[in-house]
Image: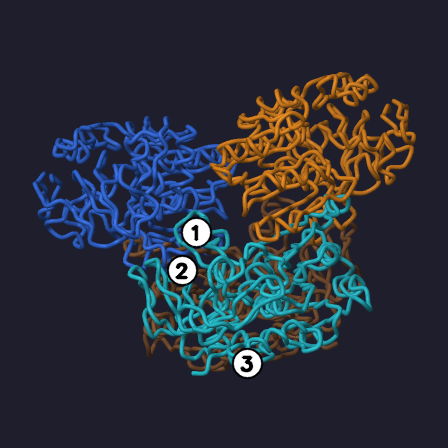
Chain colours: A cyan, B orange, C brown, D blue
Amino acid sequence: MLANVYHGAGRRSWDEVADPEITDEADAIIRVSATSICGVDLHILRGDVPSVRPGRVLGHEAVGIVDEVGDRVRTIGPGDRVLVSCVSACGNCQSCREGRYGQCRGGGGWLLGHTYDGTQAEFAKIPFADHSTYCLPPSVTDEEALILADTMPTGYEVGVLKAHVQPGDVVVVIGAGPIGLAAMLGARLFSPSHIIAIDHADRRLEAAKQFGADVTVNNSVSDPLDVVRALTDRQGADVAIEAVGEGETFELAVRLTRPGAHVANIGVHGKPAALHLEDQWTRDLTVTTGLVDTYSIPTLMRLLANRQIETSKLVTHRFDLDDIAEAYDVVSRSGETGALKVVLSSEA
Amino acid sequence: MLANVYHGAGRRSWDEVADPEITDEADAIIRVSATSICGVDLHILRGDVPSVRPGRVLGHEAVGIVDEVGDRVRTIGPGDRVLVSCVSACGNCQSCREGRYGQCRGGGGWLLGHTYDGTQAEFAKIPFADHSTYCLPPSVTDEEALILADTMPTGYEVGVLKAHVQPGDVVVVIGAGPIGLAAMLGARLFSPSHIIAIDHADRRLEAAKQFGADVTVNNSVSDPLDVVRALTDRQGADVAIEAVGEGETFELAVRLTRPGAHVANIGVHGKPAALHLEDQWTRDLTVTTGLVDTYSIPTLMRLLANRQIETSKLVTHRFDLDDIAEAYDVVSRSGETGALKVVLSSEA
Amino acid sequence: MLANVYHGAGRRSWDEVADPEITDEADAIIRVSATSICGVDLHILRGDVPSVRPGRVLGHEAVGIVDEVGDRVRTIGPGDRVLVSCVSACGNCQSCREGRYGQCRGGGGWLLGHTYDGTQAEFAKIPFADHSTYCLPPSVTDEEALILADTMPTGYEVGVLKAHVQPGDVVVVIGAGPIGLAAMLGARLFSPSHIIAIDHADRRLEAAKQFGADVTVNNSVSDPLDVVRALTDRQGADVAIEAVGEGETFELAVRLTRPGAHVANIGVHGKPAALHLEDQWTRDLTVTTGLVDTYSIPTLMRLLANRQIETSKLVTHRFDLDDIAEAYDVVSRSGETGALKVVLSSEA
Amino acid sequence: MLANVYHGAGRRSWDEVADPEITDEADAIIRVSATSICGVDLHILRGDVPSVRPGRVLGHEAVGIVDEVGDRVRTIGPGDRVLVSCVSACGNCQSCREGRYGQCRGGGGWLLGHTYDGTQAEFAKIPFADHSTYCLPPSVTDEEALILADTMPTGYEVGVLKAHVQPGDVVVVIGAGPIGLAAMLGARLFSPSHIIAIDHADRRLEAAKQFGADVTVNNSVSDPLDVVRALTDRQGADVAIEAVGEGETFELAVRLTRPGAHVANIGVHGKPAALHLEDQWTRDLTVTTGLVDTYSIPTLMRLLANRQIETSKLVTHRFDLDDIAEAYDVVSRSGETGALKVVLSSEA
């Protein structure tokens, strides 16, 4: 089959490789209908994720048709149209029993396109298939469902739910990339009174308005603190969600909140951030971090089928799977291209 | 009356001052039976708390007999023996309505010995008396109750409850001073499987054993990480409570925990701490900070009356109120004297 | 002044009575701008509420202008436009400290139009005014705010919040009277996938569609169980809210839910209901009851000001205060008149 | 092998039957070291549980040595000493993902000694073995662990945790049989101020004192309401746990609680109970029911290994597995024999 293979920092190509085969009775093979490129894939290509070895097929988001299943797979079978979660969960370890699949200690976690071959390919082998795939209702398109593989659950679980967004809250989301926008979509489900989107790119802020932001601040131009104070009787935001991954934006998230607030970090950080305990020790702050577990997929799927979230709004570009080189190029130049999520589809 | 008056950095004296008078109908005057010296009082004396102005009577912990009450005080009356909370709460603002008295926006908060004259005196005026005093049951001594003014609720609310200690948990408490020990006493109420006390003073660690620690680590000698890992199948602690107030110990608290853990900061910090988001962004961490609200006083009082917490174990030294100079000396040299809480009593 | 006075079962009249006067420093007098008639007032008139004595001015919902305040009232003053909560809370007892104002043990609770003279009058005295009145933002009309005195917080607190409505839930509301409709409005804030309204009056079911119900069942015609099963893969509803107050509808609520569901009772019951423990002991059921506390008024006010709930949809009839007899008539024949909430306004 | 076989109402015998064999790759066969007789087994024998068909091997509690495992069992292997949960969970359905194993919709639930052959035998086949067995630490005896198969998790999960027992609470437990006593053991972990045991048998009440009850009431002699009121300033209990299974005791549980209390039903009911909504609709009541999930086994095992719960106190009689007829006799006459849990052990 053809697959997007990583060949070390800066190098990938669309290669002919061996078809995946079932090696564990819990595996399933899917024929990929749609896959995507995640910000993490760009990190891998830059060589920032050494646990990804050359020769690896990249990609951890997919919708596909089940081709074959191992003997112990019970919930899906050949011909089923399924969503593949970005997290493969053993389902049995203590972490999985608590729904913390991202912390699986039974051999699961983020495997696809990381330590296992991934989904940017014609076929993909999915480990722990019963726990890691979801049958799709007919009313949901491949493209819509694809956003539930990683982006939407990340914004919802690690952002919205950890931050306990409540009706009437003032919610700040810093970073209007795909994950930040997904957090806005998810926050809207709880009827906050305001969602304030902060980014330094006007283009992204413009997009944020489509995702539920009713106030936008370009923080390279204005001070978001003034805006937040004006909206909150000078108290600060009830919730701040960090979706950038820099120390500076994390510190900004903390600074914008009222006493008793929640700050949920979603961003992928490469360096420590300063936690200003000299100010914050008295302020009843709660800071959370987390890896996506995708336990919310069934709920999000129901909301999607019911048209309560419109995930396809995140899709800005569409390509044939064969044109993955071009897709990578568009994603890597998102500043110019305005790319949020690109969808790579196989020709049916 | 006589009172302990602050005269600027490094200076305090036991002076004759005017008796307090009721100036607001919500005030009460109490005749102080017992008061104490808190670590914060030492900070004030060093000049670290500029909001305390010279001329201020210090002290925010007291048990006393009600002498007089303002017209709108309903729940206490002359002759009642009461505990005075370190937090004075208006009871009406949104913060107070949510039980977050430490964040009172209606004129309350930490007032006594701060922006109001305090309790290290023969008499003290207590603002918002209905919300800020608690009648004592006969079975509870002045000394036992005094620990509920600040120390015990701080360890319990900001440490134990914010960290969600649960049966079977492995709980780390860093810092075995009065607040850390109070956190251990409080944590025991939830039947953790282990409490690991960490301090650099063997004397304090010895004391910790009396407060529920079953493992102690002198972190100037051994690496607590080894101990925690050995007890937790290499996973890390379920809960870490920081009760020192330094960046280093906060970072240690984070480092000792498992994914999904709670880190509750109680320590008073003067500088930022590093939050190692480059490691922690994936680890489902929850960090909390907070000022004591003393909402737990009624519960703690019931536990005390029922002999389920023994707060008098924290009292290491007792003085007459007149001998407050000596008491300050003992507290300020706690490294040598082993002072935890000192009780200053008026001669009946 | 003129007021609606109860004269024993079946009798009320619009009488000249003495103006209310401040008798406690926590009282406020308001000049009533708008008041309403609640189902409970009809119960009183039938003689079902013996704690209401003849001579009592009825009514517990009001918006008005502050006329005078007692010495200890701090948060409102003459000329302020305020909402009066149906619950008067001392703010100081343990129940009030936990936000359970409806259970106030310090002399508060449901007082107005019950054991105190109420709001169906030109003027009303409001006890515990600081805790029981809310200044109105200019963007909110009297009529909109009036619904927050009782109806909307009851549906939201006792129904929606106690039942933990979550995104994607299937929510059943039995009873499409004012409280049931308020529960639907409130449930919508949490993005359930479906709200199923059940009533035996088609007219009310028609109204329910304006309040967020997307499925309606006339249970004198069809079996709601079929509808619920069809929508929930035969599992049952996630949440059922009882807003009728009869044993039969309570039992229906229980029967319609899946294992692990929440049943929130809001209805005013006069008789016991059967709890079918022979079926339910295994089904992880949670049943809650409750009196409104109105702790949610600040949140609801923010949502109202922000146009996220449209409470005026509940107002079907409007009268001058003088025409209260006619208003009572309309409300008491709601089956014919379609009355939900009537608003009685003073002529400005 | 030999096994205790049900032959229809009133009849059981210790018969030679075929050894169990692995029929699904998720099965395990264990050689039973210790098993017990549960109250439910007596119900079955009376013919009250028609889903149990003649020919069925009874028993759903066991500790044993793994003899053989199916191909997809990963967490245990031959020779391991394991606890068998009374609930067999598929681990994959939505109920299992939420930890509600008792509600498994993937083919699990209460299977052993019900719709599958059970554990009162020399060998037993355990379905879904990875999710339903727990390796035992050496410091825990077979007998101690056996109580974690059903009794202790039932009291803890369905009673203590659903009722949210908190430090300082007054907790009523009605019924001092094995499950009620387990609830008392479990409640103690949260440091309630009082546990009040209610039963009509003095012998059981005497036992209750060993399990943490500090007040006992024989409700055929005294009115528990007086006792509860005296201990709670006339408010009522914070928590009531029903562990009898009759309408009368359920109603008593509700009647003994304060407004805002939790009533957790554990009892197995055969008839409806009256829920006095005419009194309770205003009282902020929460009533819960539930089937045990045994999700708490890992926590309880840690507490047991750490000597924080002493489950062997529940064991009153010990027999060889061969003497099961005598054991059933002792259990069925528990009123005379004082039997709580009997342990049936194979001769090593």
Compare marks 1 and 2 and give the one earlier in the sequence: 1
Q: Secondary structure at mark 1?
A: loop
Compare marks 3 and 1 and give the one earlier in the sequence: 1
* Residue C24 x, y percent position in the rendering: 72, 50
Q: Are marks 2 and 3 in contact (CB under 8 Å)?
A: no
Q: Which numbered circle lies on residue A107?
A: 1
As shown in the figure, which amino acid type bears the numbered disc 3?
Phe
Q: Which numbered circle lies on residue A127?
A: 2
Give the left or right position of residue C288, taking residue B47 as reference. Answer: left
Frontmost residue, C51 versus D254:
D254
Mark 3–mark 1 distance (CA, rounded to whole Å) = 33 Å
Frontmost residue, D54 versus B196:
B196
Give the left or right position of residue A70, taking residue B144 as reference. Answer: left
Pointer 2 chain: A
Mark 2–mark 3 distance (CA, rounded to whole Å) = 27 Å
Q: Secondary structure at mark 2?
A: loop
* Residue D144 x, y percent position in the rendering: 32, 31
Asked if B159 appears above or below C67 in the picture, the reply is above
Q: Residue D308 lies in what quarter of the image?
A: top left
Q: Which residue is mark 3?
A: A319
Q: Are marks 2 and 3 on the same chain?
A: yes
As shown in the figure, which amino acid type bears the numbered disc 1?
Gly
